[in-house]
Amino acid sequence: MVNISKIQDSYLRIKNYIVNTPILVSDDLNKQFNASFFLKNEVDQVTGSFKIRGALSALSNLKDKNVKGVVAFSSGNHAQGVSKAAQIFDMHSIIVMPEDAPQNKIEKTKANGAEVVLYKRHIESREKIAMQIAEDNKYPLVKPFDNEDIIAGQGSFGLEACEYFMQNNLVPNIVLSCTSGGGLVAGTSIAFKHYFPDVDIYPVEPKTCNDTEISLKNKTRTRLKNHEPTICDALEVEIPGEITFPINLQNCTAGLTVTDEEVCTAMKYLYKEFNVKAEPSGCVSLAAVLSGKLSCEGKNILITISGGNVDDKDFSNYLKLAKD
């Protein structure tokens, strides 16, 4: 069971290794929607995304048990988080990544000392490959979201955000969280519901990969029947996590979705307004606001900017796809 105490304990273990990332405020955005927006920027986090939080949480516990190595599967950000955490704790890491993952994510994972094993996305099962490697090496498999220590670590994002609101005597009305398997929104929702029980929490996904939105409507984990590609490579999953979904079903109001074009428009806005280069997956929460997916007027709203691992060429191409 992941609760506020577990999140607080996790934060104490990892806080010396992470950045308490900044909250960005835009007068332009606030005036445009007659609301108050607070953008928590994990682009400035170690490894360029929130994933290091959960990885440090999980691996710090494994290190205490004298585990020498770990296996993980990821399209990129969890890969970098686990490989960096393994490097910090002097552990061996083997990471299973799709061969079409952004090259900068693969190279950064290798730079952290990881052994990278590539697989064919949508053809081979990354989980089966990783499980076999874990069995062969007698290493634990550190899943990207269905792991209580991972969820607790991601909850440190929410804990920091809650502390910001409390220190500034503000009450948040809405939290928007980028969502794949649901680890970040699950941990964040536990923190926010503890301190601000009336807050509305919305997981945000690509329109073509909306398993959480559908599952919340159905009130049960529902696997996508059809999956179309999206530029939000870090958010491509077919079904919410077994551990994360019950938390999100209890804490979340509803799921929201955005198109790739709306994501590109959010990337462009974020870059022009804050000079922040965020990856597509990191911008879905802002995209939901800019494309009018929810009523914002008069409300205090946390927007999650979850990561910035995008290479310059891809970034330039995405900005060209943005709506003027």
Image: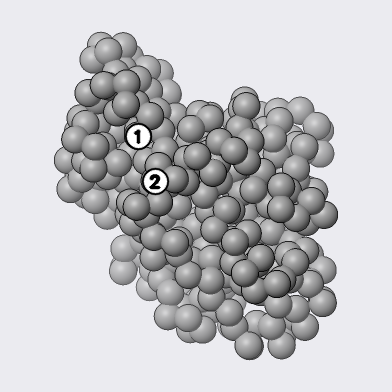
Which residue is nearer to you in this view: 79 or 19? 19
Location of residue 99 (image quadrant): top left
Element marked by disc 2 = helix
Give the residue at x 55% y 41%: 7
Residue under label 2, please give it: 14
Which residue is nearer to you in this view: 87 or 320? 87
Amino acid under disc 2: Ile
> How far across and how far down the image is residue 47, in percent?
32, 54
Say left or right for 262 vs 156.
right
Amino acid under disc 1: Ser
Give the residue at x 27% y 21%: 67
User: Quick check: 31 above or below 290?
Assistant: below
> How far across and how far down the image is residue 64, in percent?
32, 26
Give the residue at x 33% y 39%: 82
Separation of disc 1 and disc 2 at Cα? 8 Å
Location of residue 44 (image quadrant): bottom left
Give the residue at x 75% y 55%: 196
> How far across and how far down the image is residue 237, in percent?
55, 37
Residue under label 1, please give it: 60
Location of residue 284 (image quadrant): bottom right
> How far across and how far down the image is residue 65, in percent?
32, 21
Which residue is nearer to you in this view: 98 or 320? 98
CB-based contact (under 8 Å), mark 1 and mark 2:
yes
Quarter of the picture containing the N terminus is top right
Within 10 angstroms of label 2, few (less than 14), some, or many (20 or more) residues? many
